[in-house]
Amino acid sequence: MLPSSIQISGEPLSGAEVRDICRGLRDNTVRLLSLRGCRLCDRDFGRICRALAGATSLAQLNLNLGVVSSPGRIKQLAEALRTNRSIQSLFLHGSPLTDAGLALLNPALALHPALVALDLGDCMLGDEAINLICGLLPPDGAKSGLKELTLSANPGITPKGWSRLAIAVAHSSQVRVLNLDYNPLGDHVAGMLAVAVASSRTLEVLDLEGTGLTNQSAQTLLDMVENYPTALRSLVLAENSISPELQQQICDLLSEGEEEEELAGGAGDTQEPERGRGPAAQPSWMCPGESSSQMVLMTSGLGDSLLAETEM
């Protein structure tokens, strides 16, 4: 039987449903498991964790919106991840992890051989968590690491923490998608991120929606896009105090860069991108007045795309 998906949202899970989920995981018939916002007892959560530990077909696990709600559950998930070898995308958006909880998860995350996408948005993280996350973005030439990282809505992270992340991104040979929307970054942090983007050879998508930016940030980002060749294809600047004119100029430059790449590719001058490693198909730029999509495609290492929700 081909692997399938189980997607349940915002409902209490019955004992029968939990048994079916565990059976599917043990029989390796589940490729995507999404229990977004579901309610279940600690015993049933432990049963699911024990089943996913040995699952070999599971590529995406979505536990968004408070499913991992206690230190005990964090420990159970960490234990499962230490054994599992197949999960490529892990979504914990809206979980009250805090820095202490991420410290419990981090050893399993750091050693996982397949994990490439991680969503820690709205997880009550601070600077100590950033120090751990930077370890998941190894420097150029080191082991493989995350390709897609979401840290939306973690206001406890200070400019010092964001500066550490910017340095890690600049030196990472892996990260391609970085979502920092709805954090109070401001112009100073945006300037550091512009330097990181200019240094990175892989970062293609940067989401800075609702991050307190002004025209000062936009001018810096415009100069970066205009004067430095980067891999950047998508820059989301909605819900900031940035003039439509500056947003349009950035939009136009990113669009021109993509058109040039497409023309070069059509002429056979460039190699075909490696399958399963680039960001999923999506608009390459965000013009003024547009908003970032609530649904994004997270890439999998098996060469196809998995559908995942990004929570706000």
Image (cartoon, helix red, strand yellow):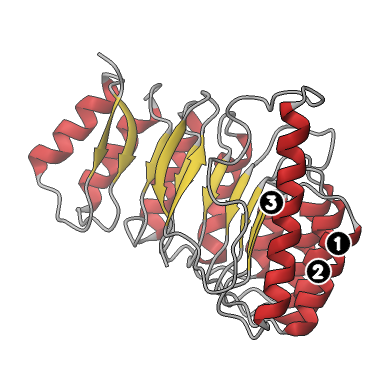
As shown in the figure, which amino acid type bears the numbered disc 1?
A: Glu
User: Height in image: 160 above or below 24?
Assistant: below
Label 3 environment density (alpha carbons within 10 Å; few <14, some 14–19, many ≥20): many
Label 1, secondary structure: give it. helix
Residue under circle 2?
Answer: 222
Task: State which quarter of the image contains the C terminus.
Answer: bottom left
Q: Which one is earlier in the sequence, the residue at label 3 or at label 2? A: 2
Q: Earlier in the sequence, mark 1 or mark 3?
A: 1
* Residue 80 visible (yes or no): no
Say which element carries label 2: helix
Drawn side of residue 160 relative to residue 130, left or right: right
Name above or below for residue 227 compared with residue 115.
below
Q: Are marks 3 and 2 in contact (CB under 8 Å)?
A: no
Are circles 2 and 1 on residues that touch, CB within 8 Å? yes
Residue 264 in view: yes
Q: Amino acid at mark 2?
A: Leu
Residue to which mark 1 is pinned: 226
Q: Is residue 47 above or below residue 158?
A: above
- Disc number for residue 149: none
Residue found 28% across the figure and 48% down from its top: 35
Q: CA distance from mark 1 to mark 3?
A: 13 Å
Reading the image, the residue beneath label 3 is 233
**Residue that appears at 57% across and 28% down:** 276
In this image, 217 relative to 287: left or right? right
Position of residue 94 measured from the top left corner of the image (x, y, whole percent): 41, 64
Amino acid type at image mark 3: Arg
In this orientation, which residue lies closer to the viewer: 124 or 144?
A: 144
Number of numbered discs: 3
Q: Residue 182 location, x and y as percent?
A: 55, 74
* Residue located at (60% from left, 52% from top): 149
